[in-house]
Image (cartoon, grey):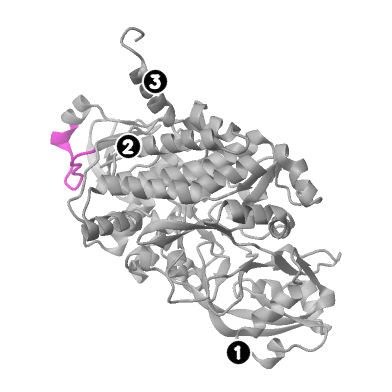
């Protein structure tokens, strides 16, 4: 891969909000996500050298005005090359300027529309090596994602400071989706009207589709002392607008909520039609108070409800078909049972600034063999967020979304404190980063070190409670991304003998630490750093030094296995998921498990090694240098 080196940052004197149309905002968002995915995985590009740039600049076409930063050249197999302006970049993210410029093999220069540039890159046999039909499938999803992002920018305006967002606002504030993904908002099988109803970025709110189902046709499972049936009855009972037949169902029947997108697909299945005909399933329709889509799309939240819900959905979002698998729902039950015992008590005592949203129960219709029908899974998740007037917590992906027209929500928090209290913005940015590391990353590292438990805490699975704009409490969710290491299995099994059974989430240290490196460090921590740097609030070197000092201190003070710290501090490369190659391959990455991942992964240079070498050199005496 091509190492992204930092350029000189531009420090804004004050927050600047530029008037930009929805189309322009969506174009920047789509180009940024696409290029950041491609450039991380492809070695073919490079920045123009000073002499090359000087030779080109007199002939650059009108509209392509790269002031400051760099011009990156992306050569095509045809002999042409695409030029793109990068106002600033870090080792993990590039700021992208539009439009693209096409440098012909004959030396001609002309600007090209974004759709043309992306088509050239997706179909290029070198940049996007692969089968033509897979290239066209990816291009279709890239276009679909771009249109979805434009719709979101057209319909919605950014809320105020993130410190004032309530839970639902924080979930729905993310407009463009994943910052390093070629098609972050693609939704196979979802039309525009459905997207407007159900998508979080479009403010999706809707009532659930309710049924009554006889318990004999249901798979009901709970990992706690509270049965799943009781949780479902409590859910229905929390909404006084639901009919009495749901709130007080007849003997033997259980209130069963479905996502209104999934309901028609379930009702059309022959085995479900049979259940309805025989009186075991009674569809009642969309009823009751609205639920809001959360950042995960298939998860929903309502202020009145004692549980959040996560559904199987028969559609593909980005790289995964969103039908829940049995192994995924089992992980939630096992973690809930573990957390209800001595391990959970120890975590609460050791890490009081951490809360884990359990997924303690699920329900599904039985298929013809009496097993759970995966397309009908409904997972119940803890819901401590019951007050719409209370702030937060805020999804990290929402906080770190980069925009061309204004600072990111994270940058706005730092700038707001600087305006309110005075002080150096770079020192404040470092303070925010250090607080984030202490509040959110320290617990994840030490939970792994002491207990071998792994949380897939990427930026859409981590939410942060803020106090005066600074991190104060970590909320973890999405138990389907949890696992544990083989090295700690026997210890955990003493508390939960069946841990890992039918869950596909027992991992070797090599695989587990590689996944932790990507989800927690590359996807999350380095995105925080890139956001602060590209907002012009801190130098990349200073931010990386803060991370280096944190990891060295954590290793020295750790009360468990320090091999992950060794991995992060001294391994020549880190592990990153390759969202571009994964998308191009058209796999369903959700099908992977503890024995292997279907997504593409790659090695990227460890950015801390250069700092360590520089520090080692500086510490040597002149005689030894």
Q: Which residues are magenta?
A: 56-69
Q: Quadrant of the C terminus?
A: top left
Q: Is residue 386 above or below residue 430?
A: below
Instruction: Please identify, in this view, whether the residue under mark 1 or under mark 2 is nearer the observer.
Output: 2
Which residue is tagged 2? 542
Front position in the image: 541 or 115: 541
Chief secondary structure of the magenta portion: loop
Q: Circles 1 and 2: CB distance less than 8 Å?
A: no
Mark earlier in primary sequence (3, 2): 2
- Closest to the observer, 380 or 158: 380
Question: Counting other residues with Cα less than 10 Å from the Cα at mark 1, is it few (<14), some (14-19), or many (20 or more)?
Answer: few
Upstream in sequence: badge 1 or badge 2: 1
For marks 1 and 3 on the same chain, the one whose residue lies earlier in the sequence? 1
> Is residue 67 rendered magenta in the image?
yes
Which labelled disc corresponds to residue 240? Answer: 1
Q: Is residue 12 magenta?
A: no
For the residues labelled 3 and 2, the Cα–Cα distance comes to 17 Å
Q: How would you rate the neighbour count of disc 2 (Cα within 10 Å): few for under 14, some for 14-19, many for 20 or more?
A: some
In percent of width and height, residue 462 lies at 51, 55
* Residue at the spot 38% in from the left edge and 55% down from the top edge: 401
* Residue at the farthest top position: 623
Q: Secondary structure at mark 2?
A: helix
Whole-percent x, y for residue 589 in the image: 61, 48
Question: Which numbered dot is residue 616?
Answer: 3
Identify the image quadrant of the N terminus: top left
The percent position of residue 614, horizontal first and vertical second, equals 36, 23
> How far apart are the two marked residues, 1 and 2, measured between alpha carbons?
54 Å
Q: Is residue 120 above or below residue 330?
A: above
On the rendered structure, is 264 left or right of 161?
right
SS assignment at label 1: loop
Which of the 4 image quarters holds residue 445? top right
Residue 533 is tagged as none
């Amino acid at each position: 891969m091509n190492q992204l080196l930092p350029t000189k940052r531009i420090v804004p004197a004050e927050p600047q909000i530029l008037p930009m149309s929805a189309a322009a905002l969506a174009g920047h968002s789509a180009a940024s996500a696409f290029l950041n995915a491609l450039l991380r995985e492809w070695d073919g590009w490079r920045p123009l050298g000073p002499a090359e740039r000087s030779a080109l600049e007199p002939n650059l076409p009108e509209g392509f005005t790269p002031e400051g930063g760099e011009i990156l050249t992306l050569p095509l197999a045809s002999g042409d090359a695409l030029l793109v302006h990068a106002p600033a970049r870090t080792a993990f993210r590039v700021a992208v300027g539009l439009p693209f410029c096409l440098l012909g093999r004959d030396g001609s220069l002309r600007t090209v529309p974004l759709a043309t540039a992306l088509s050239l890159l997706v179909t290029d046999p070198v940049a996007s090596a692969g089968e033509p039909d897979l290239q066209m499938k990816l291009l279709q999803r890239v276009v679909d994602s771009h249109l979805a992002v434009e719709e979101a920018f057209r319909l919605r305006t950014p809320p105020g400071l993130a410190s004032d967002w309530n839970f639902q606002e924080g979930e729905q504030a993310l407009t463009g989706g994943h910052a390093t993904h070629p098609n972050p908002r693609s939704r196979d099988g979802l039309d525009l009207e459905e997207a407007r109803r159900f998508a979080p970025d479009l403010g999706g709110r809707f009532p659930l589709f309710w049924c009554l189902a006889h318990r004999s046709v249901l798979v009901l499972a709970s990992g706690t002392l509270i049965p799943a049936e009781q949780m479902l009855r409590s859910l229905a009972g929390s909404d006084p607008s639901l009919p009495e037949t749901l709130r007080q169902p007849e003997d033997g029947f259980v209130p069963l909520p479905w996502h209104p997108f999934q309901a028609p697909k379930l009702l059309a299945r022959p085995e479900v039609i049979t259940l309805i005909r025989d009186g075991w399933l009674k569809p009642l329709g969309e009823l009751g108070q609205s639920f809001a889509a959360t950042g995960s799309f298939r998860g929903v939240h309502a202020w009145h409800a004692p549980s959040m819900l996560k559904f199987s959905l028969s559609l593909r979002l980005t790289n995964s078909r969103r039908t829940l698998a049995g192994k995924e729902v089992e992980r939630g039950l096992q973690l809930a049972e573990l957390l209800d015992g001595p391990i959970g008590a120890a975590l609460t005592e050791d890490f009081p600034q951490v809360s884990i949203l359990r997924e303690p129960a699920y329900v599904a219709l039985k298929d013809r063999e009496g097993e759970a029908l995966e397309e009908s899974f409904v997972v119940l998740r803890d819901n401590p967020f019951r007050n719409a007037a209370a702030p937060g917590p805020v999804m990290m992906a929402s906080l770190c979304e980069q925009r061309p027209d204004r600072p990111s929500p994270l940058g706005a928090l730092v700038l707001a404190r600087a305006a309110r209290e005075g002080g150096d913005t770079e020192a404040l940015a470092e303070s925010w980063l250090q607080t984030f590391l202490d509040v959110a990353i320290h617990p994840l590292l030490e939970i792994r070190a002491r207990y071998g438990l792994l949380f897939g805490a990427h930026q859409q699975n981590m939410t942060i409670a803020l106090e005066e704009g600074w991190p104060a409490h970590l909320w973890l969710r999405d138990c389907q991304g949890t696992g544990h290491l083989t090295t700690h299995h026997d210890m955990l099994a003493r508390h939960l003998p069946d841990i890992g059974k039918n869950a596909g989430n027992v991992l070797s240290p090599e695989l587990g630490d590689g996944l932790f490196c990507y989800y927690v460090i590359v996807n999350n921590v380095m995105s925080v750093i890139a956001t602060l740097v590209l907002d012009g609030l801190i130098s990349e070197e200073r931010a990386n030094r803060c991370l280096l000092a944190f990891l060295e201190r954590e290793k020295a003070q750790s009360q468990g296995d320090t091999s992950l710290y060794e991995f992060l501090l001294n391994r020549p490369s880190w592990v990153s998921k390759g969202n571009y190659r994964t998308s191009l391959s058209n796999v369903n990455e959700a099908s992977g498990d503890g024995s292997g991942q279907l997504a593409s992964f790659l090695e990227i240079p460890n950015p801390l090694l250069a700092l360590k070498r520089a520090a080692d050199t500086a510490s040597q005496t002149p005689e030894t240098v």
